[in-house]
Amino acid sequence: MIIKKQVLKYGIIIFSLISVFNACSKDPAVSRVPAPPPSEGQVVSDVVYGSNTTWVDTMQNLTMDIYMPTHIDAGKKYPLVVNVHGGGYVSGDKLSTASKCQIYADSGFVAVSINYRVGWNAGGASDCTGDTSSALEAMYRAMQDINAAIRFLVHNADFYSIDPDWIFLSGASAGGVVVQTSSYETDNYVQQVYPELVSKLGNLQNADNDLTNTYSIKGICSIAGGLLDSNLINSSRAYPTIFFQGGSDEVIPVDHGTYLNCSNYFQLYGSLCLYRRLVANGESAVAHILPGAGHGNNGDSGYSDQFMIGNSACFFHQIMRGESQQTILIGTINSCL
């Protein structure tokens, strides 16, 4: 792969970032934060990428932290990883993924951790009393926010030294679900399957800001995540994916089942099922399964951040080199070739 080099131009113009948006009448995000551009190893905190109403109808500014690669060559563009925290769509914060983002940045990526809108009528959640319609709305809002964040980053790709041709997603638990659903569920799909969500919350690709940049996802890291519809992985749409999941995950099924093992909650298809779907469609896939591990801190799989993100960064670099592999690994065996 040839990476195009472009020299960053420094100017004396200071661009202001519009941080207040209206959910119905939105101003487009400005293409620059104050100059000069961020330097190597820098973390740019609390960058506003949009704004929208929460599940309780309050306005929320949506922010991200941007971790620049540890070593930057002038004019070079770097692949992007957008990292999404867990928390069951009721809690969580972008700071919880700081160590993951730092490992990605040390591996040559611009790594971004985002805050997204959380909240639903979870009831006792684990005692199966939550409102599933409310849960689906929370997932839908998260997809809207991730899409808006990526549009913002593509719009500002030059400023943040991002190569928009290489965009990857990484997430744990609820984040592991939403990075996959946001990749596979299109506006056309949700209009057919979830018309009530579209009617209430709008389309997937026009929320939070007025940016219209397009992009394509090149690969996914799913940590204890899943999909609501495994048939979304097919011959026309399949993304290289590396999975990490505890073999005794009690929240997201390792193969297939229901959320939290509640019979009244929605179906979910976990790492092993999705791995088989990818392999059946000829796509690169790796599944790391840790026997005996459950759904741990921040929805992780029981593996360390260094193990998961180190292998994920390697997997993403393989994709960029045009390399492929298909393997299931039990325990702490590295998949990095």
Image: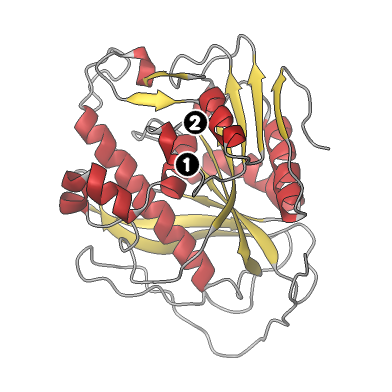
Marking on residue 180: 1
Residue name at image x 68 percent, y 27 percent: 304
Query: x, y percentage for residue 36?
Result: 63, 78
Q: Mark 2 points at which residue?
A: 225
The foreground one among 302 and 115 is 302
Question: Could you tell whether 242 is left or right of 41 in the image?
Answer: left
Q: In which quarter of the view is residue 222 placed? A: top right
Question: Could you tell whether 69 is left or right of 65 in the image?
Answer: right
The reply to whether discs 1 and 2 touch (Cβ–Cβ < 8 Å) is yes
Position of residue 31 relative to residue 61, above or below, is below
What secondary structure is marked by label 1? Answer: helix
Q: Which residue lies furthest to the right in this view?
A: 337
Snapshot colouring: secondary structure
Residue name at image x 61 percent, y 9 percent: 292
The foreground one among 309 and 37 is 309
Q: In which quarter of the view is residue 206 placed? A: bottom left
> Does the rendering let one see residue 242?
yes
Q: Residue furthest bottom?
A: 12
Residue name at image x 76 percent, y 57 percent: 70
**Residue type (three-letter) at the residue carrying disc 1:** Gln
Residue name at image x 33 percent, y 15 percent: 126
Query: x, y percentage for residue 323?
Result: 77, 47
Viewport quadrant of the N terminus:
bottom right
Q: In which quarter of the view is residue 73 placed? A: bottom right
What secondary structure is marked by label 2? Answer: loop
> Does the rendering let one see residue 120?
no
**Residue type (three-letter) at the residue carrying disc 2:** Gly
Circle 2 packing at 10 Å, graded few (<14), some (14-19), many (20+), is many
